[in-house]
């Protein structure tokens, strides 16, 4: 797999939807800590996007409202993972300027339809009008232009992380308004093992993940995944995945600190 940071590194902003449609690979930072200075530091990392985690991370609607600006100031798209079932929050973070929303525990076609309804304006969905902040961030002053383009440029990723979701995968992919799927390998390993283990790199799960990627691509949808181990990116990339979320900010701090400490100790030995 070849990869170049490209536009995000130069500060030039292109919409996430356009980049994925062009077949680009997107490496996203993962932000859980809600402190503004930490968000700024994560946004400055040499990655293409920032995902703000509102499910297991500390990103409430208020934090997301204030976090999107610093992310976009770096020329990067902001993605938000909402809490389970909070489809009302999906609409709100789009109004704040987010370019994509990841919805956890989409376990059925009905779940996918409810999520899509909150993400898209009519006739595709039921999203309510009210996007002056998003228009400002994206430089779109014409309301009609926003209405005509927002559905295509606001990406809805349904998380596939349970046996039920996997069984309903084709139906979820067929829902109008669902733009892609996002694999949560941790929860998927728990579900597939019947609650016996948590192993995001579980060997017996790799074929399932590959199948999800193949079926998403075949349906004309995006395949995305959370990477607990960056070394797996190549394997998933060969299976059609093009959006990767790399662990999280606490991990970055830990790994960076360890590397610095190891280097310091090695220099003195």
Image (cartoon, rainbow, N blue to C red):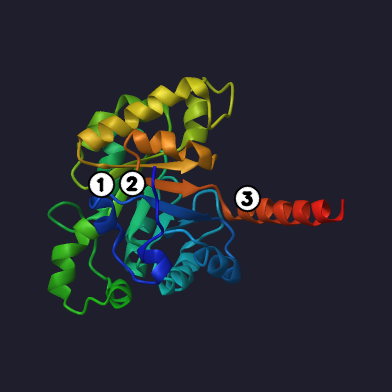
Name the spot of residue 234 as percent of width and height, x first: 43, 38
User: How dense is the environment of label 2, judged by Cα within 10 Å: few (below 14), some, or many (20 and up)?
Assistant: many
- How dense is the environment of label 3, judged by Cα within 10 Å: few (below 14), some, or many (20 and up)? few
2 and 3 marks in contact (CB < 8 Å): no
**Residue 84 location, x and y as percent?**
44, 45
Q: Earlier in the sequence, mark 2 or mark 3?
A: 2
**Residue shown at the point (16%, 66%) measured from the top left:** 147
Q: CA distance from mark 1 to mark 2?
A: 6 Å
Is residue 161 visible to the viewer in this orientation of the structure? Answer: yes
Q: Is residue 132 shown above or below 223? A: below
Q: Indicate the secondary structure of the residue bearing disc 1.
A: loop
Q: Earlier in the sequence, mark 1 or mark 2?
A: 2
Res 251 label: 3
Q: Secondary structure at mark 3?
A: helix
Q: State the quadrant of the N terminus.
A: top left
- Crowd tier of the residue under label 1, counting other residues whose Cα lies within 10 Å: few below 14, some 14–19, many 20 or above: many
Residue carrying label 2:
157
> From the viewer's perspective, is the residue at label 2 or at label 3 nearer?
3
- The picture places residue 146, in percent across and down from the top left corner, at 18, 69
Q: Which label is found at residue 179? A: 1
In the image, 268 versus 26, the foreground residue is: 268
């Amino acid at each position: 797999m070849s990869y170049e940071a490209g536009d995000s590194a130069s500060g030039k902003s292109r919409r996430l939807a356009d980049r994925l449609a062009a077949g680009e690979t997107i490496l996203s930072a993962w932000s859980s800590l809600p402190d503004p200075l930490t968000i700024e530091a994560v946004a400055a990392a040499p990655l293409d996007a920032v995902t703000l985690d509102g499910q297991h991370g500390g990103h409430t609607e208020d934090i997301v409202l204030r976090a999107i600006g610093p992310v976009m100031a770096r020329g990067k798209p902001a993605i938000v993972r909402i809490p389970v079932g909070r489809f009302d929050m999906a609409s709100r973070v789009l109004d704040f300027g987010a370019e994509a929303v990841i919805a956890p525990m989409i376990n059925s076609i009905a779940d996918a339809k409810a999520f899509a309804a909150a993400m898209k304006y009519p006739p595709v969905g039921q999203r309510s009008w009210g996007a002056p902040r998003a228009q400002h961030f994206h430089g779109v002053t014409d309301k009609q232009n926003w209405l005509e383009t927002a559905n295509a440029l606001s990406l809805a990723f349904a998380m596939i992380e349970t046996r039920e979701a996997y069984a309903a995968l084709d139906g979820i992919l067929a829902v109008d308004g669902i733009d892609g799927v996002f694999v949560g390998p941790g929860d998927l390993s728990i579900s597939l093992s019947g609650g016996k283990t948590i192993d995001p790199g579980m060997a017996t799960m790799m074929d399932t993940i590959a199948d999800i990627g193949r079926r998403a691509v075949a349906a004309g949808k995006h395949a995305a995944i959370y990477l607990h181990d960056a070394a797996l990116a190549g394997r998933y990339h060969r299976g059609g995945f093009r959006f990767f979320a790399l662990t999280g900010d606490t991990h970055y701090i830990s790994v960076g600190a360890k590397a610095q400490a190891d280097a310091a100790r090695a220099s003195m030995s």
